[in-house]
Image (cartoon, helix red, strand yellow):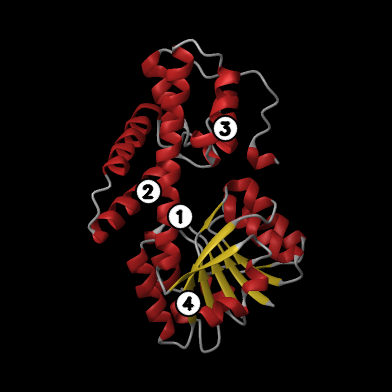
Amino acid sequence: MRIGFIGLGTMGGAAALNLIKGGHRLAVCDLDPDRAKQHIELGATWADTPAMAAKGAEIVFTMVFGPKQIEQVVRGENGLLSAMREGQIWVDMTTNQPSLARTLGKELASNGVQAVDAPVTGAVDGARNGNMTQFAGGDEGTIERIRPVMELMGPMHYMGQSGSGSITKLASNQLWAIHATAMGEALVMAVKSGVDLPRAWDALKIGASESWCMHHDAPSVFAGHYDPSFTLDLCQKDLGLIVEACDDAGTAAPATRLVRAQFEEARQLYGGEKGELHVVKLEEDAAGVSLRMDGNWVPHWKK
């Protein structure tokens, strides 16, 4: 298929490569042309604007920082709204406000475009290895029609009407933030109480305490880099959207609000550009405990 892909960041760049390797013809666009070097070497063409990326494309994928950026991609000068027409499909993989996802989808629908919100999860290794989970909202028939393309990037789950994908992604990130914070608290408590860290980690990866965080993310703490592939600034952007979704739904979400405060404290103390798991370092430093552990901790984004 002819595909436009806008946003070649850590996740988007890897996802676009998987589409190229799957045999599709891509026009790629990003604020930084250097990010497209590998894609162009593999046969993609460069597009200076979102409108150019959309020209002649059957599907246009977007994956940018957040609501402000995707609004600009769609509504801005030389944006998708100026270029996309009847029969094209727009798939937005941005972590977005569900209400904005619906609104932008309706605006493009007035041009005859089918809109799908399909934000992603699975970290950089998932994107690189074609195992990036996608939560899709929108017309089910449209989504099923493009499922073979989407599954080149990873598993795709249909979640319901427009906006459902965005809500599901926020819920996923909500749980991750709570789990990451809880993981730090539990490991620090165990180690400060005299339990050997390797034994504590082995025990907490099984039974009621098991989580993706404990398996996938703990090694970034042990290595001491705290996963710079996703920053505290990004965490706070997502947590702001999550709390907004809780407010819109009328849910109390006390744990989520406490965790948001913890991430903000870590951001203020260490800097917004620091890795997401500095929320664990916050607990280490408060307790005077180090969770460094010797081992061959290959960063997940290099796997």
Q: Earlier in the sequence, mark 1 or mark 2?
A: 1
Mark seen at residue 195: none
Q: Nearer the viewer, mark 4 or mark 1?
A: 4
Is 200 placed above or below 44 here? above
Crowd around label 3: few <14 · some 14–19 · many ≥20 (10 Å): some
The residue beneath circle 2 is: 237
- Viewer-closest of 41 and 186: 186
Res. 241 image quadrant: bottom left
Residue 23 shown left or right of residue 30 in the figure = right
Residue 34 shown left or right of residue 50 in the figure = right
The reply to whether callout 4 and callout 1 are in contact (CB within 8 Å) is no
Q: Nearer the viewer, mark 1 or mark 3?
A: 3
Q: Please indicate, yes or no, whether residue 241 appears anywhere in the rendered image.
A: yes
What x and y, as percent, mark residue 123?
A: 57, 47
The reply to whether callout 1 and callout 2 are in contact (CB within 8 Å) is yes
The residue beneath circle 1 is: 65
The residue beneath circle 4 is: 115
Q: CA distance from mark 1 to mark 3?
A: 32 Å
Q: CA distance from mark 2 to mark 4?
A: 24 Å
The residue beneath circle 3 is: 205
Secondary structure at badge 3 equals: loop
- Look at label 1 and name its amino acid: Phe
Q: CA distance from mark 3 to mark 2?
A: 29 Å
Q: Earlier in the sequence, mark 1 or mark 3?
A: 1
Q: CA distance from mark 3 to mark 4?
A: 39 Å
- Look at label 4 and name its amino acid: Ala
The reply to whether callout 3 and callout 2 are in contact (CB within 8 Å) is no
Secondary structure at badge 1 equals: loop
